[in-house]
Image (spheres, rainbow, N blue to C red):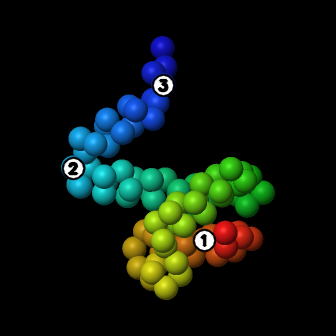
């Protein structure tokens, strides 16, 4: 049986999370998105996932000038080739 996670459950979990746990979640998500972009052939990339990547970058105020090093740099560099709106 699949347990569905609702908004209250997420708030309850994240409310108890330490900064280290939150950082780990952020890092894992960054690695997952980066792997998706690197390993998925361009013709197989899904619009919904590209929207998730764009939202992740925007929600974290990640711009090209902010992303010169680390995992986020790789994620940002890959997304530069996609036609995202700046909204």
Residue 32: image x %, image y %? 49, 53
User: Considering only order in the chain, which callout, 2 or 3, is on the residue closer to the N terminus?
Assistant: 3
Q: In the image shown, does 39 or 9 lie closer to the viewer?
A: 9
Q: CA distance from mark 2 to mark 1?
A: 31 Å
Residue at position x 32%, y 43% in the image: 14
Q: Secondary structure at mark 2?
A: loop
Q: Residue furthest bottom?
A: 65
Q: Which mark is residue 4?
A: 3
Residue 66: image x %, image y %? 45, 81
Q: Nearer the viewer, mark 2 or mark 1?
A: 2
Q: CA distance from mark 3 to mark 1?
A: 32 Å
Q: Which mark is residue 18?
A: 2
Q: Which mark is residue 67?
A: none
Assess whether mark 1 and mark 3 are in contact (beta carbons under 8 angstroms): no
Quadrant containing the C terminus in the rendered view = bottom right
Q: Identify whether 57 is placed above or below 13.
A: below
Q: Nearer the viewer, mark 3 or mark 1?
A: 3
In the picture, residue 15 is in which quadrant? top left
Q: Which mark is residue 78?
A: 1
Residue at position x 66%, y 58% in the image: 50
Q: Residues within 10 Å of mark 1 (few under 14, many from 20)?
A: few
Q: In the image shown, does 44 or 14 lie closer to the viewer?
A: 14
Q: Is residue 27 left or right of residue 18?
A: right
Q: Identify whether 71 is placed above or below 50.
A: below
Q: CA distance from mark 3 to mark 2?
A: 23 Å
Res 13 seen here: yes
Assess whether mark 1 and mark 2 are in contact (beta carbons under 8 angstroms): no
């Amino acid at each position: 049986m699949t347990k569905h996670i609702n908004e209250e459950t997420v708030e309850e979990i994240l409310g108890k999370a330490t900064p280290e746990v939150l950082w780990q979640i952020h890092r894992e998500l960054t690695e997952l998105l980066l792997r998706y972009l690197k390993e998925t052939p361009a013709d197989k990339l899904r619009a919904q996932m590209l929207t998730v990547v764009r939202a992740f970058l925007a929600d974290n105020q990640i711009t090209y000038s902010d992303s010169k090093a680390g995992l986020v740099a790789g994620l940002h560099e890959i997304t530069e080739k996609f036609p995202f709106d700046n909204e």
